[in-house]
Image: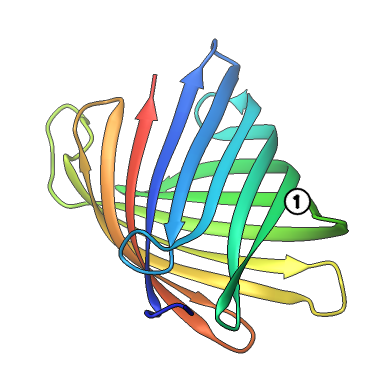
Amino acid sequence: MSQDSSFGNWIIYFGNKQIDQKWNWHHEVQYRNYDAIGDLEQLLLRTGIGYNLSENNNNVLLGYGFIASENYVGDDKVSVNEHRIYQQFITKQKIGKVGLSHRYRFEQRFVEDDFRMRFRYFLSFNIPLCSTEDDQPSKWYLSAYNEIFLNTESSIFDRNRLYGGVGFRLNKNVRFELGYMNQFFEMSSRDQLNMITFVNF
């Protein structure tokens, strides 16, 4: 049967292992559903090796991703597999207590027998909800981002993601977020509930 709901759910894990002062290993798993859970839209596995150009502020990364999609065509589902190579640059800054992050990502996408390329720009804000002593990060915070996707082919605009959520910092290595995201496509849009775990170790 075709998808019953336009409100989906993404369960996301982001991991980052600091290998030494310069090198890091990024890895993530995203389980995306068309509805609350159980109607798989995508399973995304992504990893990469990054290098810090400066301490905690500027990072370049080379990565690989595998994406298994279940796309509705009428009432039927069609499986599509994608292998993806990507390069990215992340730079961070602070304006007062608000943290900003810019991510520039260039993707080479091998979608079945098709080859595509795409550019993505991601801007995020992290806003602490309460003041702390000794410059310790706030336990609770607000998170927001916007990310635009641009193709290199004639149909330039691919999609835009707008997100807002609330986060809880368990300790210096683990934090959780719950948020709402809307994806704008050229001819449609979709709403998502995002449940995210971040782990640094």
Is 22 or 161 nearer to us in this picture? 161
Residue 75, quarter of the rendered image = bottom right
Left or right side of 141 for 11: right
Residue 59, quarter of the rendered image = top right
Q: Residues within 10 Å of mark 1 (few under 14, many from 20)?
A: some
Q: Is residue 50 placed above or below 155 in the rendered structure?
A: above
At x 70% / y 37%, what residue is drawn?
64
Left or right side of 7 for 18: right
Which residue in the protein does label 1 denote?
A: 107
Q: Position of residue 54 (x, y in %)?
A: 59, 26
Q: Position of residue 34 (x, y in %)?
A: 43, 68
Left or right side of 132 for 12: right
At x 48% / y 40%, what residue is drawn?
29
- Inspect the image, locate mark 1, and give the three-letter code of the amino acid beneath it: Glu
Q: Which residue extends farthest top?
A: 20
Q: Position of residue 114 (x, y in %)?
A: 87, 60
Q: How many numbered marks, from 0 up?
A: 1
Q: Quadrant of the C terminus?
A: top left
Left or right side of 19 for 165: left
Q: Is residue 188 placed above or below 190 in the rendered structure?
A: below
Coloring basis for residues: rainbow
At x 27% / y 37%, what residue is drawn?
175
Residue 165, quarter of the rendered image = bottom left
Label 1: element kind: strand
Q: Position of residue 105 (x, y in %)?
A: 69, 50
Is 88 or 34 nearer to us in this picture? 34
Q: Which residue extends farthest bottom?
A: 187
At x 70% / y 52%, what residue is drawn?
81
